[in-house]
Amino acid sequence: MRLTPMRFKDFTWPHNPEVYTVEYRRRIAVHQAPFGGCVLQDLGRACRVLRGEGTFAGPGAYERFRELAAVFRQEGPGLLVHPVWQTERAYFTALEAAEQPLPDYVRYRFEFWEDWGGYGGGLREIQESGAPESGQAGEAGALRHTVKKGDTLWGIARRYGVTLAALKAANPQIKNPNLIYPGEEVAIP
């Protein structure tokens, strides 16, 4: 079976790396309950991390590594096309030569972090008739968010690009930031 060559931005691997690991994690907050025990809160999944290891061999091997290092130095995320996993936007977060490079042989390791890109566009006001929905402008132009299962104040603050302190100040009805409930309305300052 012939696999698609791995690509990132304008670099295409001459042959796919030999080793891949994909790390999935879920962020969990632990809250101490009165009289012992713990309450766990699911804060959602963390970004996926793709790590790998490969070699460039033959004439020009070190030049291929230098080209890959030049791509690493470029700013911002890019499209990562992986031979086995889905294509995704990612940041190139680590690159290392795993041993002393030779003119015709370089062993290297790399790491990419998945970029969801959900926070880059900023806020947009959506004009719609009827009742406001989650994240839409409501009465008097105030932006409101309807809490969904798994939402946290920290996550809502990050989603809308506001500080947690500003979010808490705009919502004095929320006495304990660790306890928000699905269906509850949160004002976004």
Image (spheres, grey):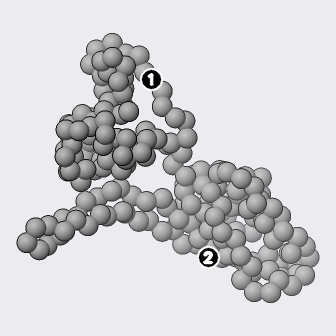
Instruction: Specify the farthest residue to the top.
Output: 129
Residue at screen point 36% across, 50% down: 154
Q: Crowdedness of circle 2 by 10 Å Cα count: few (<14), some, many (20+)?
A: few
**Front one among 71 and 119:** 119
| Residue 84 shows in this picture | no
Residue at screen point 38% across, 33% down: 189
> Measured from the top left, where is residue 59 in percent x and y?
91, 76
Residue that badge 1 annotates: 125
Mark toward the start of the polypeptide (1 vs 2): 2
Q: Which mark is residue 150?
A: none
> Measured from the top left, where is residue 44 in percent x and y?
35, 55
Instruction: Specify the farthest residue to the bottom.
Output: 100
Amino acid on which the number 2 mark rests in the picture: Val
* In the image, residue 177 above or below residue 15: above
Q: Secondary structure at mark 1?
A: loop
| Residue 42 shows in this picture | yes
Q: Crowdedness of circle 1 by 10 Å Cα count: few (<14), some, many (20+)?
A: few
* In the image, residue 38 above or below residue 89: below
Residue at screen point 33% across, 17% down: 140
> Measured from the top left, where is residue 117 in percent x and y?
54, 45
Q: Secondary structure at mark 2?
A: strand
* Image quarter in which the N terminus is found: bottom right
Instruction: Specify the farthest residue to the left.
Output: 35
**Left or right: 89 with respect to 125?**
right
Residue that badge 2 annotates: 19
Between the residue at mark 1 and the residue at mark 2, the CA separation in whole angstroms equals 45 Å
